[in-house]
Amino acid sequence: MRYYQSPNSYRSNQPKRGLWFRLFGHKKRKIVTPETTRYNNPYLKNKKKSWRIPYTLIGCLLIFFGWVSLIIWLPYFKINNITVQSQKIIKSEEVILLVSDFIEPKYYWPKNNYFLVNQKKIADLLMGKFVLQGVDVQKTFPNTINITLQEKISSIIYDDGHDYYLLDQSGSILRQIAGAGESVAVSTSTSPTSTPEHSPDLVFLKKEYGSYPIIYDLRKNEELDQTSILFPNNFIKGVIEFYNSFKQAKLGTIKYGVLDESGKLTILIDKPWIIYMQPTHDIREQIENLSIITKQSKPTEYIDVRFGERVYWK
């Protein structure tokens, strides 16, 4: 018996089977026997294994890591602006350079990313590098760090009548901070001391350098340089301690100190009287004596606390 095979049959027009189908397309034929179907429920359909949940999880993870990578490495969030607010004792350029080196990317890890910058580590770095009373580090979205420094008074401003210098606690010159033509003021007013027609420019110094003790030296020193040591170590330390203790005791506001030719230090304050003090002696005792005299008496010219328990005033 002969059969007619149509040219439009499935066998002649079936899709071409590729290598994948030839390898994995043929399923092993399941032999059904009474033993294999004895405990099967004929009404329970076999559940096919679904790959939807694993694929969904993998897709979500890829999207999440891609989003995080985009935020971390996107140049838009790169810190490129650092602002510093402080007195001019600590140079802003030095702080900016230090922080920039600290957040410089290393080993392809963007440490300068806005979300990765650690404010506490920057604050600890600055506290360890400079003499500070406090530091505040804030981030401004998307690429700015704002740093505010509260400098601890560990130096004094020295005025020789021509220039201003910054002295450290050892009495050595750190650097010249202003020249005569820039800020040294001339005054024709007289004071209880033998001060000539000159006084430190308090407005300029307060605005530019903050509340640093100021010593105006009437002695004629030779040409000053970085190797000059003008005062012993305990002298500068005593002046700073006296300024701080005087402020804490609320006895008034110190303007500046004048050191005459004999080495006597006179403190000018916002009162009609002046103070003679000795930085190398017990500062606490001198402050206590000042407090007692100002409460019990009303001096009009001076209070001399240089001689321990013996206090003179007029």
Image (spheres, rainbow, N blue to C red):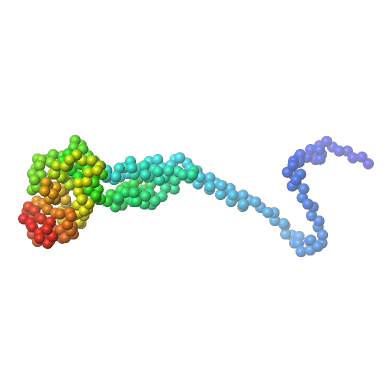
Q: Is residue 52 above or below residue 91?
A: below
Q: Quadrant of residue 185?
A: top left
Left of 81 or right of it: where is 205? Answer: left
Q: Can you say which quadrant of the picture contains the C terminus? A: bottom left
**Whole-percent x and y of residue 117?**
42, 47
**Whole-percent x and y of residue 15?**
76, 39
Q: Residue at x 14, y 42 (%)?
A: 220
In the image, farthest residue toward the bottom: 39
Q: Residue at x 79, y 38 (%)?
A: 13
Q: Which residue is drawn at 43% across and 42% down?
A: 78
Judge by depth and name the residue closer to the eye, 179 or 141.
179
Judge by depth and name the residue closer to the eye, 21 or 230.
230
How many numbered markers are drawn?
Answer: 0
Judge by depth and name the residue closer to the eye, 76 or 215.
215
Q: Which residue is drawn at 28% across and 49% down?
A: 151
**Whole-percent x and y of residue 206?**
21, 45
Q: In which quarter of the image is residue 188?
A: top left
Judge by depth and name the residue closer to the eye, 231 or 243.
231
Q: Can you say which quadrant of the picture contains the N terminus? A: top right
Left of 165 or right of it: where is 277? Answer: left
Left of 240 or right of it: where is 51? Answer: right
> Taking the image as drawn, is residue 207 in sight?
no
**Whole-percent x and y of residue 86?**
29, 45
Left of 295 or right of it: where is 101? Answer: right
